[in-house]
C-alpha cells in the first residue's frame, strides 16, 4: 500500500507522466489538437475508373465516408466506414449476399500535435476502385478548423492497377470522442469467401 501511495505521489508531481499512465486504462491525453470523434463526408463522383472512390457500383448516389478516430496523444486508432448514401443511414455490408466493401481499420495512425496533420494507412478494399481486392492506401488529412478535415486517400501499392490514384475528401465532425464507444468501431472481418467479402474489415 505504501508503494502505491508513493507511486501516485510521483505521478502527481509529473502531469505528463500521469496523463500517459491514463492511456493504459482508456483515457486520452489532452493536447492542443483534438481530432478524436466521428467525421463524415461525400466521396467524389466521376467517370468509371477516373477516381479512387466514385461509387461505380451505385453511381446514382454519392458514397458516404465516415472516419471514426480515437485520439491518444500523437497516436490514432479507428476505422473508415463506407455508406451507400450521404444521409449515412444505409451502411454498406460485407456479408453475403451484399459482399460490399464496408469498412477498414486504421493502421499506423498518427497526428502531429503542432500542425493537426493526420496520417494513417488502410490495408483493405475500397468501394468503386477495388471493391473485392486488397490494396494499401495512405491517408493524409489536415485540420482546417476544429470541425473540418481536408485530405486525400491515395493508393500506394505497386501491384495494383490503381497505384498512384487518389481521392480528395472533406470531412465534417459530427460527434466528439466522448460521444463514441467501442461498438462504433465494429468492423466485421470475414475469412470465408462463401460468407462475404474477405477484403473488407482489414
Image (cartoon, helix red, strand yellow):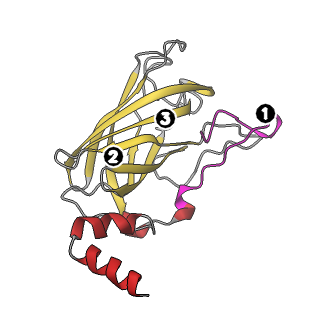
Residue at image coords 75%, 38%:
191
Identify which residue, 51 or 166, lies in the foreground.
166
Identify which residue, 164 or 23, lies in the foreground.
23
Horizontal side of 152 relative to 106 (left or right) equals left
Residue at mark 3: 122
Query: Where 90 sits versus 118, above or below?
Result: below
Residue at image coords 39%, 81%:
3
Residue 51 x, y percent position in the rendering = 43, 22
Residue at mark 2: 171
Outermost front residue: 2
Let me know if residue 30 appears in the view. Answer: yes
Residue 149 x, y percent position in the rendering = 28, 45
Q: Locate residue 131: give its quadrant.
A: top right
Q: Is residue 134 magenta?
A: no
Query: Depth-wise, is mark 3 or mark 1 nearer the camera?
Result: 3
Alpha carbon separation for disc pair 2 and 1: 32 Å
Residue 78 x, y percent position in the rendering = 47, 50
Q: Do the CB atoms of the residues marked 3 and 1 lie less than 8 Å apart?
A: no
Q: Residues within 10 Å of mark 3 (few under 14, many from 20)?
A: many
Magenta stretch, main secondary structure, is loop
Let me know if residue 28 appears in the view. Answer: no
Residue at mark 1: 193
In this picture, which residue range is highlighted in magenta?
184-202
Q: Secondary structure at mark 3?
A: strand
Amino acid at each position: 500500500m505504501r508503494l502505491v501511495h508513493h507511486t501516485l505521489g510521483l505521478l502527481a508531481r509529473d502531469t505528463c507522466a500521469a496523463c500517459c499512465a491514463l492511456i493504459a486504462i482508456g483515457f486520452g491525453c489532452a493536447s492542443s489538437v483534438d481530432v478524436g470523434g466521428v467525421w463524415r463526408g461525400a466521396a467524389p463522383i466521376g467517370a468509371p475508373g477516373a477516381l479512387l472512390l466514385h461509387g461505380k457500383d451505385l453511381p446514382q448516389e454519392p458514397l458516404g465516408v465516415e472516419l471514426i478516430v480515437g485520439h491518444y496523444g500523437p497516436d490514432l486508432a479507428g476505422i473508415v466506414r463506407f455508406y451507400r448514401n450521404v444521409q449515412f443511414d444505409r451502411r454498406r455490408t460485407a456479408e453475403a449476399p451484399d459482399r460490399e466493401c464496408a469498412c477498414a481499420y486504421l493502421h499506423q495512425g498518427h497526428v502531429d500535435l503542432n500542425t493537426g496533420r493526420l496520417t494513417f494507412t488502410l490495408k483493405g478494399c475500397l468501394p468503386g476502385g477495388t471493391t473485392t481486392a486488397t490494396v494499401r492506401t495512405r491517408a493524409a488529412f489536415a485540420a482546417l478548423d476544429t470541425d473540418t478535415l481536408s485530405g486525400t486517400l491515395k493508393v500506394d501499392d505497386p501491384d495494383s492497377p490503381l497505384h498512384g490514384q487518389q481521392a480528395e475528401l472533406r470531412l465534417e465532425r459530427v460527434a466528439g470522442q466522448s460521444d463514441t464507444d467501442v461498438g462504433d468501431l465494429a468492423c466485421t472481418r470475414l475469412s470465408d469467401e462463401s460468407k462475404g467479402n474477405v477484403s473488407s474489415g482489414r
